[in-house]
Image: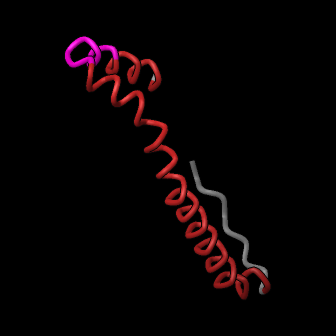
């Protein structure tokens, strides 16, 4: 559904301002490539927080704490 919406919006932009639509079409891969380092940084930060959570909850797990399943 998201892809269809993007395609319809791009077609609308193409009808209204075709040079801008073609510029978007050409520059989109460049923007995607530039965003890759930020995605990698986000994955690394998530991994650090998961490690920190694991280390902080390790004593409770060693003492036998088991979280109860959520009611519902």
Q: Position of residue 16 (x, y in %)?
A: 20, 15
Image position of 18 with respect to 54: above or below: above
Question: Would you place residue 27 above or below residue 8 in this image?
Answer: below
Q: Residue at point 25% right, 11% down?
A: 15
Name the residue located 72 percent from the left edge and 88 percent from the top edge: 59
Viewer-closest of 71 and 51: 51
Is residue 36 magenta-colored?
Answer: no
Q: Residue at 42% of width from left, 30% of height from top? A: 26
Horizontal and vertical percent for residue 25?
40, 27
Residue 35 location in percent, x, y?
48, 52
Residue 50 occupies quadrant: bottom right
Q: Which residues are magenta?
A: 11-18
Colour treatment of the image: secondary structure
Q: Is residue 31 above or below residue 3?
A: below
Identity of the residue drawn at 21% across and 19% down: 17
- Residue in the foreground of this view, choosing between 23 and 42: 23
Q: How many marks?
A: 0
Does the magenta segment cover residue 14?
yes
State which quadrant residue 44 falls in: bottom right
């Amino acid at each position: 559904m998201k892809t269809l919406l993007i395609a319809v919006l791009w077609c609308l932009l193409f009808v209204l301002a075709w040079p801008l639509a073609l510029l978007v079409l050409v520059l989109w891969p460049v923007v995607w490539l530039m965003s890759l380092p930020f995605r990698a940084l986000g994955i690394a930060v998530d991994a650090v927080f998961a490690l920190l959570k694991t280390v902080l909850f390790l004593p409770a797990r060693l003492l036998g704490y088991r979280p109860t399943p959520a009611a519902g």
